[in-house]
Amino acid sequence: MADVRAAIAQIATIDCTLITIETDGGDHFGFDTANQIQVEPQIETEDAVTLIVKGVLRAQKPQKDTLTGHEITLSDNLFNPELIAILQGGTVTHDPLDPSIVTGYNPPLAGSRDKGEVFTLHAYTAQYDVAGLVVQYERLSYPNCQGRPVSFSSEDGAFRAPEYTIFSAPQLGQSPYTLTYVPDLPVIVGQMILAPLTVTSVAGTNAGETAVTVVPLSGNSLMYKTQSAVITLPLDLQTPIGYTDWDGTASITATTGDHIAIVEVDTNGRAVAGGTTTVTSAA
Protein backbone atom coordinates (compact mmCIF):
# COMPACT_ATOMS: atom_id res chain seq x y z
CA MET A 1 0.00 0.00 0.00
CA ALA A 2 1.33 3.44 -0.92
CA ASP A 3 2.35 5.84 1.84
CA VAL A 4 -0.11 8.62 2.70
CA ARG A 5 1.28 12.13 3.00
CA ALA A 6 0.63 13.91 6.29
CA ALA A 7 -1.37 17.15 6.20
CA ILE A 8 0.82 20.26 6.12
CA ALA A 9 -1.09 22.05 8.85
CA GLN A 10 -3.47 20.96 11.58
CA ILE A 11 -4.57 24.14 13.32
CA ALA A 12 -6.32 24.36 16.69
CA THR A 13 -8.37 27.53 17.12
CA ILE A 14 -10.51 28.70 20.02
CA ASP A 15 -12.49 31.73 21.23
CA CYS A 16 -14.29 34.56 19.52
CA THR A 17 -11.34 36.83 20.20
CA LEU A 18 -12.23 40.01 18.33
CA ILE A 19 -14.84 41.31 15.87
CA THR A 20 -14.17 44.33 13.68
CA ILE A 21 -16.59 46.17 11.41
CA GLU A 22 -15.18 47.96 8.34
CA THR A 23 -17.81 50.09 6.60
CA ASP A 24 -17.74 51.12 2.95
CA GLY A 25 -17.66 54.71 4.25
CA GLY A 26 -14.19 54.18 5.74
CA ASP A 27 -15.02 53.66 9.42
CA HIS A 28 -13.34 50.69 11.11
CA PHE A 29 -14.01 49.82 14.74
CA GLY A 30 -13.74 46.71 16.85
CA PHE A 31 -15.03 45.13 20.04
CA ASP A 32 -13.89 42.13 22.08
CA THR A 33 -17.14 41.50 23.98
CA ALA A 34 -18.72 39.11 21.46
CA ASN A 35 -18.78 35.53 22.74
CA GLN A 36 -20.07 33.63 19.70
CA ILE A 37 -20.36 33.94 15.95
CA GLN A 38 -22.37 31.38 13.99
CA VAL A 39 -22.19 31.23 10.20
CA GLU A 40 -24.75 29.43 8.05
CA PRO A 41 -24.16 29.07 4.28
CA GLN A 42 -27.08 30.24 2.15
CA ILE A 43 -27.51 27.73 -0.67
CA GLU A 44 -29.86 27.68 -3.64
CA THR A 45 -30.49 24.11 -4.80
CA GLU A 46 -31.39 22.98 -8.31
CA ASP A 47 -33.09 19.62 -7.93
CA ALA A 48 -31.72 16.49 -9.53
CA VAL A 49 -33.45 15.19 -12.66
CA THR A 50 -33.71 11.43 -13.19
CA LEU A 51 -34.80 9.34 -16.14
CA ILE A 52 -36.40 6.10 -15.02
CA VAL A 53 -37.85 3.77 -17.63
CA LYS A 54 -39.95 0.85 -16.43
CA GLY A 55 -38.38 0.96 -13.00
CA VAL A 56 -34.81 1.12 -14.31
CA LEU A 57 -32.60 4.22 -13.85
CA ARG A 58 -31.37 5.19 -17.31
CA ALA A 59 -29.78 8.57 -16.65
CA GLN A 60 -29.66 11.35 -14.14
CA LYS A 61 -28.61 14.97 -13.89
CA PRO A 62 -27.21 15.50 -10.38
CA GLN A 63 -28.40 18.09 -7.91
CA LYS A 64 -26.61 21.43 -8.19
CA ASP A 65 -25.94 23.65 -5.17
CA THR A 66 -25.01 27.33 -5.51
CA LEU A 67 -23.64 29.33 -2.57
CA THR A 68 -25.27 32.78 -2.51
CA GLY A 69 -23.82 34.07 0.74
CA HIS A 70 -23.80 33.54 4.50
CA GLU A 71 -26.17 34.31 7.34
CA ILE A 72 -24.11 35.40 10.36
CA THR A 73 -25.48 35.38 13.90
CA LEU A 74 -23.34 37.42 16.26
CA SER A 75 -23.87 37.11 20.02
CA ASP A 76 -22.49 39.90 22.20
CA ASN A 77 -22.31 40.46 25.96
CA LEU A 78 -22.80 44.24 25.81
CA PHE A 79 -25.13 46.59 23.94
CA ASN A 80 -23.31 48.56 21.23
CA PRO A 81 -25.30 51.54 19.86
CA GLU A 82 -22.68 52.18 17.15
CA LEU A 83 -23.15 48.69 15.81
CA ILE A 84 -26.95 49.00 15.93
CA ALA A 85 -26.82 52.15 13.79
CA ILE A 86 -24.69 50.38 11.17
CA LEU A 87 -26.89 47.29 11.13
CA GLN A 88 -30.29 48.93 10.81
CA GLY A 89 -29.70 52.66 10.31
CA GLY A 90 -30.70 55.50 12.59
CA THR A 91 -28.44 57.76 14.62
CA VAL A 92 -26.66 57.61 17.95
CA THR A 93 -27.09 60.75 20.05
CA HIS A 94 -24.43 62.26 22.30
CA ASP A 95 -24.12 64.79 25.09
CA PRO A 96 -23.36 68.15 23.39
CA LEU A 97 -20.98 69.09 26.21
CA ASP A 98 -19.19 65.72 26.21
CA PRO A 99 -19.44 63.88 22.86
CA SER A 100 -17.97 60.73 24.42
CA ILE A 101 -21.22 60.21 26.37
CA VAL A 102 -24.00 58.40 24.50
CA THR A 103 -27.45 59.75 25.37
CA GLY A 104 -29.61 57.57 23.14
CA TYR A 105 -30.35 55.98 19.81
CA ASN A 106 -32.95 57.07 17.24
CA PRO A 107 -34.01 54.28 14.83
CA PRO A 108 -34.96 55.03 11.21
CA LEU A 109 -38.40 56.53 10.68
CA ALA A 110 -41.15 54.21 9.48
CA GLY A 111 -41.13 54.06 5.69
CA SER A 112 -37.69 55.66 5.35
CA ARG A 113 -35.00 54.38 3.00
CA ASP A 114 -32.47 54.25 5.82
CA LYS A 115 -31.43 50.58 5.95
CA GLY A 116 -28.03 50.84 7.60
CA GLU A 117 -24.61 50.52 6.00
CA VAL A 118 -22.76 47.96 3.90
CA PHE A 119 -19.66 46.64 5.64
CA THR A 120 -17.07 43.88 5.87
CA LEU A 121 -17.08 41.80 9.04
CA HIS A 122 -13.74 40.45 10.29
CA ALA A 123 -13.86 37.66 12.90
CA TYR A 124 -10.63 36.79 14.73
CA THR A 125 -9.98 33.45 16.46
CA ALA A 126 -6.87 32.51 18.44
CA GLN A 127 -4.57 29.60 17.54
CA TYR A 128 -2.76 27.94 20.46
CA ASP A 129 0.23 25.57 20.57
CA VAL A 130 0.94 22.65 22.95
CA ALA A 131 2.55 25.04 25.46
CA GLY A 132 -0.70 26.99 25.78
CA LEU A 133 0.63 30.01 23.93
CA VAL A 134 -1.11 31.97 21.18
CA VAL A 135 0.97 31.59 18.02
CA GLN A 136 -1.22 33.49 15.55
CA TYR A 137 -4.79 34.51 14.78
CA GLU A 138 -7.22 33.29 12.17
CA ARG A 139 -9.14 36.09 10.45
CA LEU A 140 -12.33 35.30 8.54
CA SER A 141 -13.62 38.23 6.49
CA TYR A 142 -17.15 38.36 5.07
CA PRO A 143 -17.82 41.02 2.37
CA ASN A 144 -20.92 43.09 1.57
CA CYS A 145 -22.60 42.55 4.93
CA GLN A 146 -25.93 44.11 5.79
CA GLY A 147 -27.76 43.87 9.09
CA ARG A 148 -31.30 42.82 9.89
CA PRO A 149 -33.57 44.82 12.25
CA VAL A 150 -32.58 44.35 15.88
CA SER A 151 -34.93 43.44 18.74
CA PHE A 152 -34.46 44.20 22.43
CA SER A 153 -35.34 41.93 25.33
CA SER A 154 -34.79 42.03 29.08
CA GLU A 155 -34.95 39.44 31.86
CA ASP A 156 -34.78 39.65 35.66
CA GLY A 157 -31.39 38.64 37.02
CA ALA A 158 -29.74 38.43 33.60
CA PHE A 159 -27.66 40.93 31.70
CA ARG A 160 -28.89 41.61 28.19
CA ALA A 161 -26.95 39.56 25.63
CA PRO A 162 -27.86 41.03 22.23
CA GLU A 163 -27.97 38.78 19.18
CA TYR A 164 -27.45 40.32 15.75
CA THR A 165 -28.35 38.78 12.40
CA ILE A 166 -26.19 39.77 9.43
CA PHE A 167 -26.33 38.66 5.81
CA SER A 168 -23.21 38.59 3.62
CA ALA A 169 -23.50 38.25 -0.16
CA PRO A 170 -20.45 38.39 -2.48
CA GLN A 171 -20.36 40.43 -5.66
CA LEU A 172 -20.09 38.58 -8.99
CA GLY A 173 -16.58 37.12 -9.18
CA GLN A 174 -15.88 37.84 -5.49
CA SER A 175 -15.06 35.18 -2.90
CA PRO A 176 -17.83 34.63 -0.33
CA TYR A 177 -15.21 34.97 2.41
CA THR A 178 -11.45 35.09 2.87
CA LEU A 179 -9.42 33.27 5.51
CA THR A 180 -5.98 34.56 6.46
CA TYR A 181 -3.59 34.08 9.37
CA VAL A 182 -2.06 37.11 11.06
CA PRO A 183 0.56 37.31 13.82
CA ASP A 184 -1.24 39.95 15.89
CA LEU A 185 -4.66 41.44 16.46
CA PRO A 186 -5.31 44.95 15.17
CA VAL A 187 -4.69 47.60 17.81
CA ILE A 188 -7.94 48.96 19.27
CA VAL A 189 -7.26 52.54 20.28
CA GLY A 190 -9.46 54.85 22.30
CA GLN A 191 -11.15 57.14 19.82
CA MET A 192 -13.29 60.23 20.36
CA ILE A 193 -16.26 61.10 18.24
CA LEU A 194 -16.37 64.48 16.53
CA ALA A 195 -17.55 67.65 18.18
CA PRO A 196 -21.17 68.16 17.08
CA LEU A 197 -22.34 70.42 14.26
CA THR A 198 -26.02 71.25 13.79
CA VAL A 199 -26.80 70.76 10.10
CA THR A 200 -30.01 72.04 8.47
CA SER A 201 -31.18 71.36 4.90
CA VAL A 202 -33.88 73.34 3.09
CA ALA A 203 -34.89 73.53 -0.55
CA GLY A 204 -32.40 75.41 -2.72
CA THR A 205 -33.07 77.89 -5.49
CA ASN A 206 -32.72 75.46 -8.39
CA ALA A 207 -34.37 72.06 -8.89
CA GLY A 208 -32.42 69.22 -7.29
CA GLU A 209 -30.42 71.53 -5.01
CA THR A 210 -30.43 71.96 -1.24
CA ALA A 211 -29.32 74.94 0.83
CA VAL A 212 -27.41 73.80 3.91
CA THR A 213 -26.57 75.77 7.03
CA VAL A 214 -24.10 74.72 9.73
CA VAL A 215 -23.89 75.84 13.38
CA PRO A 216 -21.40 76.67 14.74
CA LEU A 217 -19.57 77.85 11.63
CA SER A 218 -15.83 78.20 12.27
CA GLY A 219 -12.98 79.40 10.10
CA ASN A 220 -11.92 75.84 9.24
CA SER A 221 -12.58 74.16 5.91
CA LEU A 222 -15.78 72.18 5.35
CA MET A 223 -16.57 69.03 3.38
CA TYR A 224 -19.83 67.24 2.56
CA LYS A 225 -21.08 63.83 1.57
CA THR A 226 -24.52 62.65 0.42
CA GLN A 227 -25.95 59.17 -0.02
CA SER A 228 -29.22 57.29 0.37
CA ALA A 229 -28.03 55.24 3.36
CA VAL A 230 -27.23 56.64 6.79
CA ILE A 231 -23.76 58.21 6.97
CA THR A 232 -21.36 57.35 9.78
CA LEU A 233 -19.18 60.36 10.54
CA PRO A 234 -15.41 59.92 10.73
CA LEU A 235 -13.86 59.89 14.18
CA ASP A 236 -11.93 62.76 15.70
CA LEU A 237 -8.74 63.50 13.69
CA GLN A 238 -9.63 60.86 11.11
CA THR A 239 -9.32 61.78 7.41
CA PRO A 240 -12.80 61.88 5.80
CA ILE A 241 -13.23 59.44 2.91
CA GLY A 242 -15.58 60.12 0.00
CA TYR A 243 -16.24 63.74 0.98
CA THR A 244 -16.26 66.82 -1.30
CA ASP A 245 -14.90 70.27 -0.46
CA TRP A 246 -17.58 72.87 0.33
CA ASP A 247 -17.32 76.63 0.89
CA GLY A 248 -20.12 76.73 3.45
CA THR A 249 -22.59 78.68 1.31
CA ALA A 250 -22.95 77.12 -2.16
CA SER A 251 -26.04 75.03 -2.90
CA ILE A 252 -25.47 71.28 -2.99
CA THR A 253 -26.99 68.89 -5.51
CA ALA A 254 -28.80 66.19 -3.55
CA THR A 255 -32.01 64.15 -3.51
CA THR A 256 -34.81 64.75 -1.04
CA GLY A 257 -34.83 62.00 1.58
CA ASP A 258 -31.13 61.17 1.20
CA HIS A 259 -28.65 61.82 4.00
CA ILE A 260 -26.04 64.57 4.04
CA ALA A 261 -23.03 64.90 6.33
CA ILE A 262 -20.98 68.05 6.88
CA VAL A 263 -17.51 67.70 8.35
CA GLU A 264 -15.17 70.44 9.54
CA VAL A 265 -11.50 69.65 8.91
CA ASP A 266 -8.27 71.17 10.21
CA THR A 267 -5.34 72.38 8.11
CA ASN A 268 -4.11 68.78 7.81
CA GLY A 269 -7.45 67.61 6.39
CA ARG A 270 -8.45 65.77 9.58
CA ALA A 271 -12.01 65.84 10.89
CA VAL A 272 -12.63 67.88 14.04
CA ALA A 273 -16.42 68.37 13.98
CA GLY A 274 -19.39 67.03 12.06
CA GLY A 275 -23.12 66.55 11.80
CA THR A 276 -25.76 64.93 9.60
CA THR A 277 -29.34 65.55 8.53
CA THR A 278 -31.90 64.45 5.95
CA VAL A 279 -31.90 66.30 2.63
CA THR A 280 -34.68 68.61 1.47
CA SER A 281 -34.07 69.78 -2.10
CA ALA A 282 -36.01 71.93 -4.54
CA ALA A 283 -38.50 70.10 -6.76
Image (spheres, grey):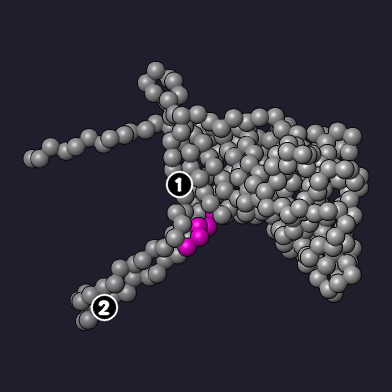
Between 99 and 93, the one lying in front of the other is 99
Mark 2 residue crowding within 10 angstroms, few (<14) / some (14–19) / many (20+): few
Of 135 and 50, which appears nearest the observer? 135
Please report the residue visible at 83 percent of the width from the left and 67 percent of the height from the top: 209
On the image, the x and y values in percent for residue 207 come to 83, 73
Of labels 1 and 2, earlier in sequence is 2
The question of residue 283 being in magenta is answered with no
Closer to the camera, 17 or 222?
A: 222
Disc 1 secondary structure class: strand
Q: Amino acid at mark 1?
A: Thr
Bounds of the magenta segment: 168-172
Category of crowding for the residue at label 1, using alpha-carbon neighbours closer than 10 angstroms: few (below 14), some (14–19), many (at least 20)? few
Picture coordinates of residue 171 (x, y %)? Answer: 50, 60
Q: Which residue is mark 2?
A: 51
Quadrant assignment for the C terminus: bottom right
Q: Position of residue 216 (x, y in %)?
A: 91, 45
- The extreme left residue here reads 1
The residue that label 1 is drawn on is 178
